[in-house]
Amino acid sequence: MTAFAYRAADRSGAQKKGMIEASSPAAARAALREQALLPLSVEVAADKTASIGTIKLPGFRRNRISARQLSTVTRQIATLVGSDIPVEEALRLVAAQSEAPAVSALMTDVRGSILDGRSFASALALHPKAFPEFYRASVAAGEQSGKLTHVLNHLANFVETRQANGQKLQLALMYPALLAVVSVGMMVLLMVYVVPDIVRVFVSRGAELPFLTRALIAISAFLQNYGLYLLLAMLVGYIVFNRWSQKPANRLRIHRNFNERLPFRRFSKQFNASRFAGSLATLVESAVPLVEALQAAAAVTPNLHVRQKAFQVGVRVREGVSLRAAMTESGVFPTMLVAIVASGEQSGKLAPALGRAAGELERELDAQVATLVALVEPMVLLLMGGLVLMMVLAILLPIINLNNLVGL
C-alpha cells in the first residue's frame, strides 16, 4: 500500500485535499470516485513533500518530522492504543487529524506497511530518519512482551521531555545570539556609512588626530575597501571547514575536543550523559535486553567521541563485565551516573536508577544553562557597549581638541 496526496471535488464543486492509501494511482482515483469525489490530482505523498513548486528536490526532508511533531504523534498513538484501538486504526486517525502533510504522509506510509503484513516496529524501521533507533527498539520490545501500551506511554513521556529540554536550551540562547548579531551588524553599518562622513571634517584640517580616531578611520577604510573580500573569505573558510569537518576522523577529533579540552567540556559531558542515561532508561524499562539497549542508546548519543565509548561499553557488557565497571573504564561518564548505575545493578532496579540519574543530570543541565545565560547576556551587553564607547570617544576626542585644530 502506498500513500497518495489527492485533490478532489465533491458534488457541490468544493475542492478537498487529503491522503488516501492505494496500490496504484489508478486505484486511488477509483477509491475517490467510490466516495463521490472527482479526482483532480493524485500524487505519491513522499514525492509531493519532497518538492517545492515545480522544482523537484529528491530526498529533501523526505520521511522526516520535527522533534515537536514526533512528540505529538507519539502521545496521540499512545492514547489511542491505550483505549484498545488497533495500531493501524490509531495511525489512520493520527494521519487524518494531522495538519502537517509530512506527518500525515508518514503515518499513512507506516499504516500501509502494517496492512501489508509488517509489524509496527518493522514498519517504523522503514523510516529511520523519522524514528530514532531507541524508539524503534522500544516499540519492538513492547510488541514482543505484549506491553505496547506501556511502552508507548513511556516513550511519549521521554520524547516530550527531551523535546521540551531542547526547546528550552534554544530559547535560552536565542536572545544573546540575536543581540550580538544585531549589535555587530549595526556597528558595521556605522563604520561603513556614518563614520567616514563624521571624521572627514577632522581629516581635512590636516592636524594630527588621536590614536583612537586614527584607528577608527583605518578600520572604517578597511571595511569600505575590503569588506566584501572579508565576507567572501569568511564564507570560503566556512565552506572549507564544513567539508573538513564532514570527514569522520575530523568530526571525531572535534567532538573529542568538545568533550575533553574546550571550556564547555563539563556541559558536554553532562548533556551526552543525560541523553545516554535517558534513552537507556527508556529501553530497559521497555524490557529491551541490556546489550541491545546499550547499542541503541549509544546510537542516539550526540557526541561522536562519547558515542564511540558508549558502544565499547556495550561490547564490554556482552563480554560479561558489569555495566558499572564498563562505564568506569570508558572515562566519559560523570561519577554520579556511574554510582547510581552501581546501586541500580546491586538492587536489581536498573531502569528506575537510570531514570533518576537522567533526571538529576537534566536538573544540573538546567542550572548550568541558567548560569550560562545569566553570564552571557551581561557579557554581550558589556562587550557591545564597550565597542560603542570606543567609537564615541574616537569621534569626540577631536571635537574636544577643536580649538587646537582651528588654531593650526
Image: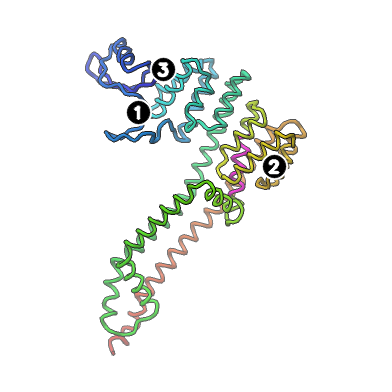
Residue visible at 70% across and 46% down in the picture:
335
Among numbered discs 2 and 3, the one appearing first in the sequence: 3
Please, what secondary structure does the residue beneath circle 1 have?
A: helix
Q: Which mark is residue 184?
A: none
Query: Which amino acid type corresponds to the residue marked 3 in the rendered image?
Result: Met
Question: Magenta: predominant secondary structure element?
Answer: helix
Among numbered discs 2 and 1, the one appearing first in the sequence: 1
How would you rate the neighbour count of disc 3 (Cα within 10 Å): few for under 14, some for 14-19, many for 20 or more?
Answer: some
Residue 34 picture location, percent across and down: 31, 9
List the residue tagged with mark 2: 327
Residue nearer the viewer, 31 or 189:
31
| Stretch in magenta | 268-280
Up/down of 401 relative to 118, above or below: below
Residue visible at 25% across and 81% down in the picture:
204
Please, what secondary structure does the residue beneath circle 2 have?
A: helix
Up/down of 345 relative to 107, above or below: below
List the residue tagged with mark 3: 1
Among numbered discs 1 and 3, the one appearing first in the sequence: 3
Determine if the magenta segment contains residue 279: yes
Q: Which mark is residue 47?
A: 1
Q: Is residue 303 left or right of residue 48?
A: right
